[in-house]
Amino acid sequence: MKRGVDDLALFGGPEAFMQTLYVGRPNIGDRARFFDRLDWALDNQWLTNGGPLVREFEERVAEVAGVRNCIATCNATAALQLLVRAADLSGEVIMPSLTFAATAHAVRWLGLDPVFCDIDPATGCMDPKLVQELVTPRTTAIFGVHLWGRPCAVDELEKVAADNGLKLFFDAAHALGCTHDGRRVGGFGNAEVFSFHATKVVNAFEGGAIVTDDDGLARRVRALHNFGFSHEGVPEEAGTNAKMSEAAAAMGLTSLDAFETAIARNLENYECYRAEFAELAGVTVVGFDKRQRNNYQYVIVEIDEQVTGIHRDLLLEVLRAENVVGQRYFSPACHQRPPYRDAVRAPLPHTEWLADRVLALPTGTTVSREDIRRVSDIVQIAAGNGAQVTSRWLQREQRTA
Ligand SMILES: *Cc1c(COP(=O)(O)O)cnc(C)c1O
């Protein structure tokens, strides 16, 4: 056990972990069940093209989301692009900058302009009042992001969309199984998109899904994701190929079987981190509304450098030296990086403030209580002696420069 700054691996102490601890290790579920499903697909030689496993996966995701329609896709980025096409969007799409790059990429890839909107610093999600201010004659849609599984201000965004005749979609990549005022994520706006990438709480190796109660939109998305083929197998318009394969669905179903277990473990981990950091000034675990359901997929801590004396980035280095790989979700924000640096229309002070202090810590079914205790010890030593850690680090940097 580490007692002080001298014990930190960054300053020559022994590493706390032999095996590296990561954010977003896959939740695989029952491996035997996965191979059974895969065997079934191989035995029946039905590997793709809307096979039984994909259809079952779509039904189960629609059930989780509480919606009528689900179209499974090869990933969430393609799903977002399908929505742009299926809804005939053009011009500008208003979205947050504090998100994974794919939200902006999906729009830019199709020749539209993402327009970044600042967030409410209390939630990390877009501020609906600011969305209204960014609407121009070129605006055709709003893309909300349920950051870290915290639902956006959906009612207010629905009002802004309706007032301005805009489509409203949600990037719900983090928000499978979450609720807002008792309503399930999946049914908000015109449609929502989930990701089943390997790092997400439910994975299909790679995968995504569009969920919606708009039957017409669903029909068009389904056609477009399969070369534009209609029900009868005639190509009606130029589509793409964004289908999910049966192998991916086999993993998706198996991971879904384990979803409730994963949520329970994530919640335990989250409570454990919260207890560990309860007395630590300047380190705050981002909270979730207890009346809502969440999947607790991410444990996000905010590091206040003014209070701790250590910046988030140096704390990441401290952890990395101990073989703990945290993530800057999502820093730098989209508008702070090259492809979107020129796309800023209005200042984004709250986005920049939050992006500068957030850190995702390892959680998930592979992270034990003991792991969390040891990660927390490291954070406590580093943040509890932040000024000392920072000055020792700077001295060392100067010597090696
Ligand atoms: C992971 C993620 C995506 C991309 O999902 P893919 O399935 O990898 O394409 C999009 N948006 C957000 C917010 C994400 O976290």
Image (cartoon, rainbow, N blue to C red):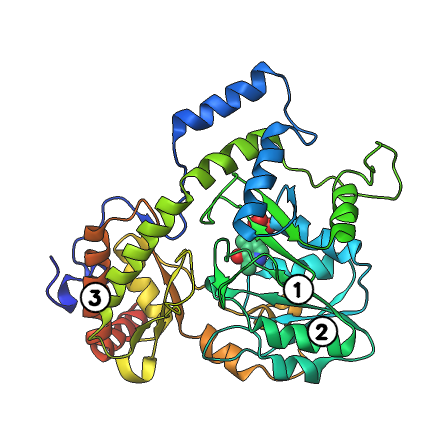
Residue drawn 64% across and 70% down?
A: 95
Circle 1 sits on which residue? 189
Circle 2 sits on which residue? 161
| Looking at the image, residue 202 lies above or below residue 13 | above
Q: Amino acid at mark 2?
A: Ala
Return the residue found at the far top.
43
- 259 or 395: which is nearer to us? 259
Circle 3 sits on which residue? 276
Element type at mark 1: loop
Where on the picture, by quarter, is residue 132?
A: bottom right
Report the quarter where the N terminus lies: bottom left
Residue 182 rendering spot, x and y as whole percentages? 49, 64
Element type at mark 3: helix
CB within 8 Å, label 2 to label 3 = no
Residue 80 rendering spot, x and y as whole percentages? 67, 55
Name the disc covering residue 331, or none.
Answer: none
* N-terminal-most mark, 1 or 2: 2
- 16 or 301: which is nearer to us? 301
Q: Is residue 122 visible?
A: yes
Residue 23 rendering spot, x and y as whole percentages? 38, 53
Where on the picture, by quarter, is residue 272?
A: bottom left
CB within 8 Å, label 3 to label 1 = no
* N-terminal-most mark, 2 or 3: 2
* N-terminal-most mark, 3 or 1: 1
Report the quarter where the C terminus lies: bottom left
